[in-house]
Image (cartoon, grey):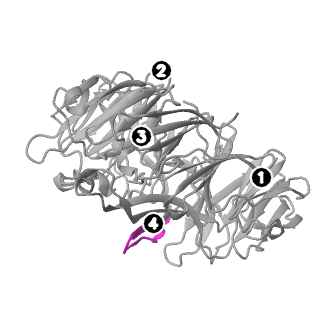
Amino acid sequence: MKKVTLLMMTLLLAFSLPANAQFGKLLGKGKSAGKKSGSFATAWEAEFDNKATRLAVSINNGQYVLGTDDNSATVLDANGKTVWSGDYKKITTNKTNKCEYQYVIQRGGDKGGYLFLFDERKLGTDRVAVIDIATGKELWNSEEYQNLIPKGTKAEEGTDQGELETVKYISELDAFLISQKASVILVKANTGEKVWETNRFKGGVGKYIYDPGRNEIVMINFKPTALGALFAGFKNQLVKINAVNGDILWDATFIGTIEKELVTRRAIVDLWIKGDKLYMYLDGLQVYNINNGQKLWEVTYENDMQGANGGLFSGGRRSKIYRTIAEPLFTDNAVYIVILGTRDRTKYVEKHDLESGKLLWASEKITGAFCMPNIYKSGDKVLVQVGGKVQVQEFRLEETSAGFGAASAFGGGSVKQWVPYIYWDYKAQKNSVLCLDDKTGKTSWRSEKFDKRITDFIIENDKTLFVGDGDEFYGYDIASGNQLFDVKHNDAKVGKATDVIDFGDKVVVLSEKGLASYNKKDGSRVYATEKIRGVDYFYEIEGNYYLRDQRNSKNIIYGIDMTNGETKGSVQSKGKGGSPQYGAGIDITDDGEFIFAFKGKKVEKIKVNN
């Protein structure tokens, strides 16, 4: 599967959700259709046999299109023709029916994928079933696995937006790791056959790394909501395990608490293997010997500020802030870390030797900055972005028309539900470009001309830095700090700058009301367009550029020609389904050439480039 690069969503969507899994519980209950607009051409329009109120998503770059409701599924082929359709209770031999959880695993190529169903039964044994996307046949079912989700959870409540906390798909092994009270079990995804079971690892899998050369898995645990009450003496575990037989090769205890993001439910932890060392990013940086699990060194600090302490849980909105602190920046022999002081809340940068963890230098303390989301290495300089955008994840309690279910049975009406939103925002703070000498950590130069906001940086050939604030666009010589140009971006009349896009010999400045493009050589303006407002995300997918507007409970995706700023077309939807990374009712193929717009039973495939 080709990689989707999300320029504003590192990890999403990057960030966020696994690229190969889409989840029915994340999706809103909108009513509006995806509709043709601009110059986009419709490849085809089709209908699902069911209402597609739970999942509606393209599979394997549009090879299949899946639509599900609580009790049934329909799969279309690449031409919009029905491949199969049926009720779960008829497809599954254990009569799995109303499914509290559903998610699809995409396998790439012509392999289709898996539709995972979980049927929680209040009086009886919980049921699990897995259906083959390509054929509609049941691959396996089981009633052995219990307590996989919190009891009484309703799909529409939006309480958990990811894979089941207790079920992790290991793509490299084509298998599921299923957490139970006393053990973790590896099960073949296509047959349900138990490969191994170990009682030496307990809890859910927060993060894992697979080593294909050794056929080993390194994974870290957390206490899942579903099993939390069942655990006694739960301990934090970091383990290396033999993927063939489940033998624990080593077991280490880590320090810290794994939290999950509000909407994506992504565990706020990362693992990297570099040489013979394992690096874990959790409440700081913890480093282990990959061969025996011995802790070698650590630097303790807050990463991502635990949601930035910005949680708001009142009225009709639940909100948290993320992406506030830059991830560690690794080079061949060092790692650079943005440190958040625990007492005075000031921030600074530290450089540590990669082998020993020895502190090589610490920068000046930086006050007045809410976030420091990016650091860059450029030749013999380290560039620090002080201030900038932060990611907001929130649920909004919205009232939508009830076109199905109990409300419609009594003559229509409306229902309230928590609808997820992920977007970028700026916080008032002291912004600047800080350039440090790589050998000493001393400040080489600093620019504090950013009164309103500061965008991310674009660095050209380790020589030039381009950056914008709300009303200006700047170019700097990295070596000296000399300002090469200062362009009055507000003259473009496209509103305040929100981000920058690297586009060949130009920089395109995404703004509140449109786009403006500038030549890198001298800052001269190439074009400005006011045609697009309210954009909160942009995506680059295999050379195709998209902007997204989620205002007023809508979801509009624009296709943009970055050479001239012209709009190729747009698709608007408040519909059910779609990929969480593109918003309700919309999905885009991995090559960026087609958009799928969903509305209930209907789906439209749209060609981006004529």
With respect to residue 320, does 591 lie above or below? above
Q: Residues within 10 Å of mark 4 (few under 14, many from 20)?
A: many
Disc marking residue 183: none
Q: Which residue is mark 2?
A: 110
Between label 1 and label 3, give the one nearer the viewer: 3
Q: Which residue is mark 1?
A: 459
For marks 3 and 2, the one nearer the N-term is 3
Discs 4, 3 touching: Cβ within 8 Å: no
For marks 1 and 4, the one nearer the N-term is 4
Instruction: Judge whether residue 379 can be spotted in this image.
Output: no
Q: CA distance from mark 4 to mark 3?
A: 27 Å
Can you give x and y, in whole percent of width and height, for residue 423 in the image?
Answer: 54, 60
Disc marking residue 56: 3
With respect to residue 416, does 517 lie above or below? above
Q: Residues within 10 Å of mark 1 (few under 14, many from 20)?
A: some
Q: Residues within 10 Å of mark 3 (few under 14, many from 20)?
A: many
For marks 2 and 4, the one nearer the N-term is 2
Between label 1 and label 2, give the one nearer the viewer: 2
Q: Quadrant of residue 153?
A: bottom left
Q: CA distance from mark 3 to mark 2?
A: 19 Å
Q: Give 222 or 108, whichever is nearer the viewer.
A: 108
Kind of element beneath mark 3: strand
Q: Give 429 or 182, whichever is nearer the viewer.
A: 429
Q: Which residue is mark 4?
A: 320
Q: CA distance from mark 1 to mark 4?
A: 30 Å
